[in-house]
Amino acid sequence: GMADLVPGLIGMATLFGTTSMAAVMITFERRIGPLERLLLAPISLLVLILGKILGGSFFGLTISLVMVFLGIVFLGAPDDKSLASNPYHPCRRPNLFNPWLLRFGSYKGGL
Protein backbone atom coordinates (compact mmCIF):
# COMPACT_ATOMS: atom_id res chain seq x y z
CA GLY A 1 0.00 0.00 0.00
CA MET A 2 0.96 3.58 0.54
CA ALA A 3 3.36 2.68 3.36
CA ASP A 4 5.50 0.79 0.84
CA LEU A 5 6.06 4.00 -1.10
CA VAL A 6 7.33 6.07 1.83
CA PRO A 7 11.01 4.93 1.70
CA GLY A 8 11.17 5.72 -2.00
CA LEU A 9 9.53 9.10 -1.46
CA ILE A 10 12.02 9.89 1.29
CA GLY A 11 14.93 8.92 -0.95
CA MET A 12 13.66 10.91 -3.91
CA ALA A 13 12.88 13.98 -1.82
CA THR A 14 16.32 13.87 -0.25
CA LEU A 15 18.20 13.28 -3.49
CA PHE A 16 16.39 15.80 -5.65
CA GLY A 17 15.86 18.35 -2.90
CA THR A 18 19.51 18.37 -1.89
CA THR A 19 21.04 18.38 -5.36
CA SER A 20 18.64 20.92 -6.80
CA MET A 21 19.01 23.18 -3.76
CA ALA A 22 22.80 23.18 -4.05
CA ALA A 23 22.67 23.92 -7.79
CA VAL A 24 20.09 26.68 -7.37
CA MET A 25 21.97 28.33 -4.51
CA ILE A 26 25.29 28.42 -6.37
CA THR A 27 23.61 29.84 -9.49
CA PHE A 28 21.71 32.38 -7.40
CA GLU A 29 24.86 33.40 -5.51
CA ARG A 30 26.75 33.87 -8.78
CA ARG A 31 24.00 36.00 -10.27
CA ILE A 32 23.39 38.23 -7.24
CA GLY A 33 27.01 38.53 -6.12
CA PRO A 34 27.56 36.80 -2.75
CA LEU A 35 29.72 34.09 -4.33
CA GLU A 36 32.36 36.64 -5.32
CA ARG A 37 32.31 38.09 -1.80
CA LEU A 38 32.67 34.60 -0.33
CA LEU A 39 35.63 33.89 -2.61
CA LEU A 40 37.28 37.16 -1.50
CA ALA A 41 36.76 36.38 2.20
CA PRO A 42 39.85 35.42 4.24
CA ILE A 43 38.91 31.73 4.35
CA SER A 44 40.35 28.90 2.34
CA LEU A 45 38.53 27.42 -0.62
CA LEU A 46 38.39 24.10 1.24
CA VAL A 47 36.44 25.70 4.11
CA LEU A 48 34.06 27.31 1.61
CA ILE A 49 33.45 24.00 -0.18
CA LEU A 50 33.00 22.13 3.11
CA GLY A 51 30.50 24.77 4.20
CA LYS A 52 28.50 24.26 1.00
CA ILE A 53 28.60 20.49 1.47
CA LEU A 54 27.56 20.68 5.13
CA GLY A 55 24.77 23.12 4.30
CA GLY A 56 23.41 20.81 1.59
CA SER A 57 23.75 17.81 3.88
CA PHE A 58 21.86 19.55 6.68
CA PHE A 59 19.14 20.56 4.22
CA GLY A 60 18.86 16.95 2.99
CA LEU A 61 18.77 15.61 6.54
CA THR A 62 16.01 18.06 7.41
CA ILE A 63 13.95 17.04 4.38
CA SER A 64 14.44 13.36 5.27
CA LEU A 65 13.37 13.85 8.87
CA VAL A 66 10.28 15.81 7.82
CA MET A 67 9.32 13.05 5.37
CA VAL A 68 9.86 10.36 8.03
CA PHE A 69 7.77 12.35 10.51
CA LEU A 70 4.95 12.82 7.98
CA GLY A 71 5.06 9.12 7.08
CA ILE A 72 4.79 8.11 10.73
CA VAL A 73 2.00 10.61 11.46
CA PHE A 74 -0.16 9.77 8.46
CA LEU A 75 0.65 6.07 7.93
CA GLY A 76 1.78 4.89 11.36
CA ALA A 77 5.13 3.52 12.41
CA PRO A 78 6.16 0.20 10.86
CA ASP A 79 5.95 -2.75 13.20
CA ASP A 80 8.55 -5.50 13.52
CA LYS A 81 6.42 -7.96 11.59
CA SER A 82 6.25 -5.79 8.47
CA LEU A 83 10.01 -5.13 8.58
CA ALA A 84 10.83 -8.81 9.08
CA SER A 85 8.62 -9.87 6.18
CA ASN A 86 10.22 -7.41 3.76
CA PRO A 87 12.55 -9.46 1.51
CA TYR A 88 14.52 -6.34 0.55
CA HIS A 89 15.25 -5.21 4.09
CA PRO A 90 19.04 -4.67 4.38
CA CYS A 91 19.28 -6.92 7.45
CA ARG A 92 17.85 -9.81 5.48
CA ARG A 93 19.89 -9.38 2.31
CA PRO A 94 23.06 -7.42 3.02
CA ASN A 95 24.80 -8.81 -0.06
CA LEU A 96 22.07 -7.43 -2.32
CA PHE A 97 22.79 -3.82 -1.37
CA ASN A 98 26.54 -3.68 -0.76
CA PRO A 99 27.68 -4.22 -4.39
CA TRP A 100 25.04 -1.77 -5.61
CA LEU A 101 26.20 0.89 -3.18
CA LEU A 102 29.82 0.29 -4.16
CA ARG A 103 28.97 0.79 -7.84
CA PHE A 104 26.90 3.88 -7.06
CA GLY A 105 29.75 5.37 -5.04
CA SER A 106 32.22 4.66 -7.83
CA TYR A 107 29.87 6.27 -10.34
CA LYS A 108 29.38 9.38 -8.19
CA GLY A 109 33.11 9.60 -7.53
CA GLY A 110 33.82 9.54 -11.26
CA LEU A 111 31.65 12.58 -11.88
Image (cartoon, grey):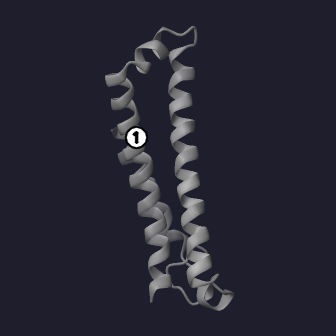
Quadrant of the snapshot with the C terminus: top left
Label 1 packing within 10 angstroms: few (<14), some (14-19), many (20+): few
- Left or right of 108: which side holds 45? right
- Looking at this view, is 30 or 87 the one in front? 30
Quadrant of the snapshot with the N terminus: bottom left
Q: Position of residue 18 (x, y in %)?
A: 45, 48
Q: Is residue 15 visible?
A: yes
Q: Is residue 98 depicted above or below 1 in this figure? A: above
- Looking at this view, is 83 or 47 the one in front? 47
Residue carrying label 1: 109
Q: Secondary structure at mark 1?
A: helix
Which residue is drawn at the image coordinates 49% and 16% (left, top)?
Answer: 38
Q: Is residue 10 depicted above or below 81 in this figure? A: above
Which residue is drawn at the image coordinates 42% and 39% (left, top)?
Answer: 22
Q: Position of residue 65 (x, y in %)?
A: 60, 61
Q: Is residue 100 visible?
A: no
- Looking at this view, is 8 or 29 the one in front? 29
Q: Position of residue 91 (x, y in %)?
A: 61, 75
Q: Quadrant of residue 28?
A: top left
Q: Is residue 20 depicted above or below 48 in this figure? A: below
Which residue is drawn at the image coordinates 58% and 68% (left, top)?
Answer: 68
- Left or right of 4: which side holds 81? right
Q: Residue furthest right?
A: 80
Which residue is drawn at the image coordinates 50% and 83% (left, top)?
Answer: 3
The kind of residue tagged 1 is: Gly
Q: Quadrant of residue 9?
A: bottom left
- Left or right of 38: which side holds 65? right
Q: Residue furthest front?
A: 32
Q: Position of residue 56 (x, y in %)?
A: 51, 41
Q: Is residue 23 depicted above or below 85 in this figure? A: above
